[in-house]
């Protein structure tokens, strides 16, 4: 059984410049990626230096305060804990905006690492075949998030003994497959889709791609995405 999660029909007002929908969406997604990069840099540089400066002040005051007021010194320790928590929260937000593995290692290695971590944590074997494909940054993030959510769903629902992730060049694009041999579910209607699968669809479509979900009770699940190839330099 297959459910195709494809492009919605385009609307358009009279006189409006009509660009191919995949192109428009792809540009919007590029802008979103740039905004996320900007936000991550601001958080890292501006918020990071404010928090560090506050920690240095606390460290400076601490010995003197401990001498004159042990009670106030306890509050200062508490303040230092809060600042450390704020630093850790800043790091988690930045990592959520820009997965660090994806930035440093590229898509194939980042997905391989997701697969390894998932397999160690769940005990489910994962076979990978991951080519170094050329995709714009927004599409790389969409594929990374797809793999992440697909593995999460396999861990939560599939009861699978094995799964596989494939990333390859296909025609003038890139194909991504995530398969498992688990219990499957009724994918005839996207009524059964939650935020995870709907989010995948939005991300892949926003990059000009399509997503097909094949599943049925007892038949395992197969997610197949196709994305137009390219690089950021081409946009
Ligand atoms: N690999 C899978 N094997 C079996 N069932 C699955 C699999 N993937 C998804 N499902 C079914 O599809 C449903 C929708 O999945 P989806 O990821 O969209 O939402 P969710 O996981 O229920 O919630 P969320 O992702 O928001 O935490 C799941 O509740 C589950 O019943
Ligand atoms: Mg889910």
Image (spheres, helix red, strand yellow):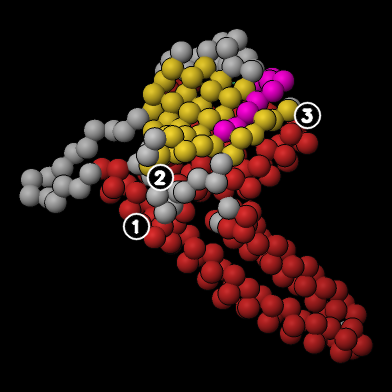
Q: Compared to 69, does 232 lie above or below?
A: above
Secondary element under disc 2, as helix, strand or loop, is: loop
The quadrant where residue 78 appears = bottom right
Residue found 44% across the figure and 34% down from its top: 170
Number of other residues with Cα within 10 Å of mark 1, as a class: few under 14, some 14 to 19, many 20 or more: few
Q: Earlier in the sequence, mark 2 or mark 1?
A: 2
Q: Is residue 46 left or right of residue 206?
A: right
Q: Position of residue 97 (x, y in %)?
A: 54, 56
Q: Residue furthest left?
A: 15
Above or below: residue 74 compared with residue 4: below
Q: Which residue is label 2 attached to?
A: 229
- The image shows residue 204 at horizontal and vertical percentages of 42, 39
Relative vertical location of residue 207 with respect to residue 83 in this rendering, above or below: above
Which range is magenta? 158-166
Local SS, label 3: loop
The numbered dot on residue 235 is 1
Q: Nearer the viewer, residue 95 or 50?
A: 95
Q: Quick check: 172 left or right of 156?
A: left
Q: CA distance from mark 3 to mark 1?
A: 41 Å
Whether residue 181 is visible here, answered yes or no, is yes
């Amino acid at each position: 059984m297959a459910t195709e999660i494809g492009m919605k029909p385009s609307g358009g007002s009279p006189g409006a410049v009509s660009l191919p929908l995949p192109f428009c969406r792809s540009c919007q997604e590029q802008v979103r990626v740039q905004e996320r990069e900007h936000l991550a840099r601001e958080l890292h540089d501006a918020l990071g230096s404010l928090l560090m400066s506050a920690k240095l002040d606390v460290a400076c005051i601490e010995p003197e305060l401990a001498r004159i007021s042990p009670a106030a010194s306890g509050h200062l320790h508490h303040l230092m804990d809060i600042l450390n928590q704020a630093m850790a929260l800043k790091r988690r937000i930045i990592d959520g905006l820009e997965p660090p593995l994806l930035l440093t290692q590229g898509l194939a290695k980042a997905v391989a690492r997701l697969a390894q971590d998932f397999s160690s944590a769940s005990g489910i074997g994962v076979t990978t075949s991951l080519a170094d494909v050329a995709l714009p940054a927004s599409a790389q993030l969409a594929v990374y998030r797809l793999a992440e959510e697909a593995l999460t769903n396999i861990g939560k629902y599939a009861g699978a003994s094995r799964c596989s992730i494939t990333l390859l060049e296909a025609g003038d694009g890139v194909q991504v497959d995530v398969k498992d041999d688990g219990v499957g579910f009724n994918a005839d209607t996207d009524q059964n889709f939650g935020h995870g699968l709907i989010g995948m669809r939005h991300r892949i479509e926003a990059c000009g791609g399509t997503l097909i979900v094949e599943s049925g009770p007892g038949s395992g699940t197969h997610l197949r995405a196709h994305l137009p190839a390219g690089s950021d330099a081409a946009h």
